[in-house]
Amino acid sequence: ARVARLYAAGHWAVWRFCIDREFLVKYNLLFWNEVRWAEDYPFDLVLAGACPKLYYLDVELVVYRANRVGSLLNAGLAKHFAGIAAVIHRFEKMFAAPDCPWTPAEQAEIWRRTANVFWPQARGAACRDAEVRAACAPGLTACKALWKLGDENTRPDWKLFAFLLNHFGPRFALWAAGLLKRK
C-alpha cells in the first residue's frame, strides 16, 4: 500500500510539475501500474517515443546499491520480474499495432534497454538463498524474450550466467551462479 501511494505521488508530480499535462494527454503517456519498482522505467522509453526533444540532466540524485543487502532494489525481487514481464507484454502489443509509432530500429533499442534493466535483476536473483531463487525462477522464465538481448556481456561471470540461463533454464542457472557468490 505504501509503494502504491508513493507511486501515485510520483505520477502526480510528473503530471503537475515536470511535463506539460496537455502533452501527456495528447500522447496518452502514463506510468504503468503493473510496474512499480522502477520510477522511470519504462515511462522514459515511452516518453522518448513522443518527445521531439529531450534534455539530459547529468546530475546524480540518488545512488542505488543494487544487488546488495539493504538495497532498495532488492526488496521484493520476484515482483521485479513480474513488472518486467508486464513491460514485455505491453511493448509486444504496442509494436504489433498497425499504428505503432516506432521504427524497427527504435524497437530494437527499446528491447536492448529493457534487457539492460532485466540483467542486473537476474544476476541479483542468483544468490545462495534457495527461497529467493525459487521465487525468482518463474519470473525469469516469463522474461525469456530478453535472455539473448542486452549489453551485459563484459564480465566472464555474467557471460557464464547468460549461457547457463539460455542452455539449462533459470532454476539451474540461478543455483549455479549462486555458488559463485560469497555468503
Image (cartoon, rainbow, N blue to C red):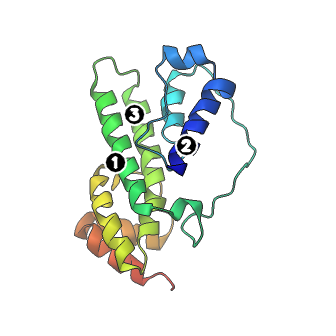
Crowdedness of circle 3 by 10 Å Cα count: few (<14), some, many (20+)?
some
State whether residue 46 appears in this view: yes
Mark 3 vs 2, N-terminal side: 2
Q: For the view shown, which residue lies furthest in the bottom direction?
A: 183
The quadrant in which residue 172 appears is bottom left
Task: Say which amino acid is labelled 1.
Answer: Ala
Q: Which residue is mark 2?
A: 5
From the viewer's perspective, is residue 66 above or below residue 149?
below
Mark 1 vs 2, N-terminal side: 2
From the viewer's perspective, is residue 160 above or below residue 85?
below
Mark 3 vs 1, N-terminal side: 1
In the rendered structure, the answer to whether residue 18 lies left or right of residue 73 reads right
Q: Position of residue 50 (x, y in %)?
A: 51, 21
Distance in Å between CA atoms under marks 3 and 1: 16 Å
Task: Say which amino acid is labelled 2.
Answer: Arg
Distance in Å between CA atoms under marks 1 and 2: 22 Å
Q: Which residue is mark 1?
A: 85
Q: Which residue is mark 3?
A: 107
* Residue 178: mark in rendering: none
Task: Say which amino acid is labelled 3.
Answer: Gln
